[in-house]
Amino acid sequence: MSLSNPRQVNPASKFIEWSGSIGQFYYYDKSSEADDKNVFIKEPIYVVPIDQLATIKGFHKQSKSGVYSNEVKNTLKDKLIVRSFKGGSIITGLYSEIKGNLEGGKYAKSMYAVMITGDKNNSQLELVNISFYGSSLGSFIDAKINIDSGCILSLEPSTEELINGATTYFAPKIIKYKMRRDILDRCIEIDEQLQAYLKEYLNKPIDEETDTPDKISITENEYKVEDTEGGSFDEDDDLPF
């Protein structure tokens, strides 16, 4: 890094996760003055997926804190550095080598997407990151999301209770829509900015410190919910707006 070539900062403006216990997506707003800085999204989220990586998320019982790792493109070739927020290093290696020793961590998908708000005459685009793990990972897998297809996804909150043993939880619904060409062109421009960041991030030496997230939001109670699987998939060719 240098004055003319500073370290790239993750360009996503929001880091969105799914609450399986509540049935809504949410993000952490550290600038909020409220005691609870989690902002829950009660309406469907419209996004264009532009890239996806793999990571580890979960809850570390020994330190009573969240588990996190770096993000990788290929779990067969790229090593994961797994840590807990308060307990430090857990394990490093390829996913196939370490998946049985994650101490509460679970495989997760990290999807970078362009979130669309507004209407046809005034569409606002914003780069976000969305994590799918636990009860939301099943929905992600069932949706068979193809990054190259250029589609819009509607990520919808849920009121349908699912049961796994003594645990009641919710899974998001993912609906596919066709996309207008003008939105696709704008998303390509945003993806170019993302790829500039990922080019540096994914090429960091494996022994470098993994960036610590601003907040590991998962709690032990929530982790019991997120340790479930579920999902659904519908398809609709109509534009959502």
Image (tube, rainbow, N blue to C red):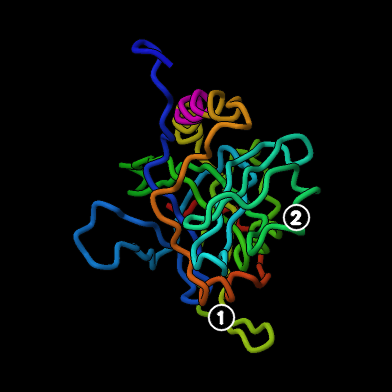
Asked if residue 47 is among those painted magenta in the image, a careful observer would answer: no
Q: Using the image, determine if residue 148 lies above or below residue 167.
A: above
Q: Residues within 10 Å of mark 1 (few under 14, many from 20)?
A: few
The residue nearer to you, when weighing 98 against 224, is 98
Q: Position of residue 222 (x, y in %)?
A: 51, 73
Amino acid type at circle 1 is Glu
Q: Using the image, determine if residue 142 lies above or below residue 15.
A: below
* Residue at x 46%, y 76% (from the top left corner): 22
Amino acid type at circle 2 is Lys
Q: Position of residue 78 (x, y in %)?
A: 71, 35
Q: Quadrant of residue 169?
A: bottom right
Q: Quadrant of the N terminus?
A: top left
Q: Position of residue 185 (x, y in %)?
A: 48, 28
Q: Position of residue 10 (x, y in %)?
A: 43, 35
- Please give the range of residues in magenta: 190-197
* Residue at x 36%, y 49% (from the top left corner): 117
Residue holding disc 1: 160
Q: Gap in Å between the C-alphas at discs 2 and 1?
A: 31 Å
How many marks overall? 2
Dot 1: element = loop
Secondary structure mostly taken by the magenta-highlighted segment of the chain: helix
Dot 2: element = loop
Asked if residue 193 is among those painted magenta in the image, a careful observer would answer: yes
The residue nearer to you, when weighing 37 against 190, is 37
Let me know if residue 66 appears in the view.
yes
* Residue at x 61%, y 32% (from the top left corner): 207
Q: Earlier in the sequence, mark 2 or mark 1?
A: 2
* Drawn side of residue 107 relative to residue 223, left or right: right
Q: Quadrant of residue 228?
A: bottom right
Q: Using the image, determine if residue 147 lies above or below residue 56.
A: above
Residue holding disc 2: 99
